[in-house]
Structure formats: structure tokens, C-alpha cells
Image: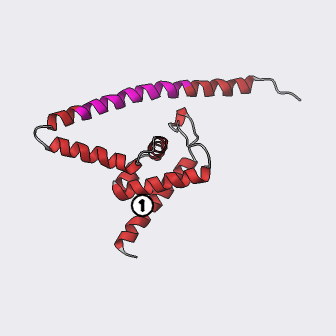
Amino acid sequence: MTSASNYTAEIEAVADAKLAELDGIPIGVATGRRLELGGDTARNAEYIRNSMIDIGQRVGLHFLQMTPAVALEQLCVVSAAKNHDTAGLLKSVINSFMVAYLTPETSDQAYAHLVGLEGLRGHVRQLRGGQRREALEQLAATILAGSTAPTQH
């Protein structure tokens, strides 16, 4: 195998490991797997796998390895729903920031946009935290209701 095919094989192995990790995580707000693709589940899994491989090839193996499986999956789902190029989005964020930041006339604006994006991420964390707590409380209430319900013989 050439080094390029070795690198591709490594990316594919990481994508497969991420998909295997997702198999053990239930769908739902509590786990962060809030969004799903409808329709053919085998086709959807193949789409997500191919998108992860594309991310690895265009953004890098290390990025693919270090990004949580749920975050990768949810990015793939949203970009599919919006008909956006998943890996292209990531490359554009990185490249756009770099070009704007390294240009002296726009570096302050680029940094301000980054700070704004980080602020938005903090808002999302609070929003999701509340939704996650609510989902876990509902799950606990359902479990407790089931354990205290009389059994019928």
C-alpha cells in the first residue's frame, strides 16, 4: 500500500470506530443525539460514514480522531438537511478565519467574530443543559412510575 492509501485506510478505520461508538449511544436529547436523518437507515449510515471520511481527508485525521462521535454525526445530519458540504463547512470556517485574521486590516474583526461565535456556543451549552436536565427528569419520572405501578397477574 502507498502512504496515501494507508492514510485513507486510517481515516476509514476512525470513521468506522466513530460509527461503532454511536451504535452504543441512544438517540435523544439526554445524549446529544437530538437530530436524525429520516428514511433508509443503512443509506443514512453510509452517508454519515462517507461524510466523516471526507472530513478526515479534507480537514485531517487528527481532527476526525479528536472530535466526539456525536458532534460529527449531528454535523453530518444538519448539513445533509440543509444540503451543505459537511467537510467544506469546516474547511471554510478555518480558511475564512485565517485569511481574515492574518490580514492586518481585518484581524480585529475576525477575532471579534470568533469571540461572538464562542459566546453563541456558551448560549447553546446553557440551552442544551436545560433540555438535557428536563429529558433526564422525564426519564426518571417514567422509570419511577413504572416501578411503583402495581403488577397484574
The answer to whether 97 is drawn above or below residue 64 in the figure is: above
Q: Principal SS element in the magenta part?
A: helix
Q: How many marks?
A: 1
Question: Which element type, helix, strand or loop, lies under badge 1?
Answer: helix
Q: Quadrant of residue 56?
A: bottom left
Q: Residue at x 45, y 40 (%)?
A: 82
Q: Is residue 124 shown to the viewer in this render?
A: yes
Q: How is the image coloured?
A: secondary structure
Q: What is the x, y in percent for residue 71?
A: 44, 43
Q: Residue at x 30, y 46 (%)?
A: 92
Q: Residue at x 44, y 53 (%)?
A: 52
The residue under label 1 is 11
Q: What is the x, y in percent for residue 152?
A: 86, 27
Callout 1: few (<14), some (14-19), or many (20+) C-alpha neighbours within 10 Å?
Answer: many
Question: Is 104 on the left or on the right of 140, as rendered?
Answer: left
Nearer to the camera, 50 or 149 = 50
Question: Is 102 on the left or on the right of 128, as rendered?
Answer: left
Q: Which quadrant holds the N terminus?
A: bottom left
> In this picture, which residue range is highlighted in magenta?
113-134
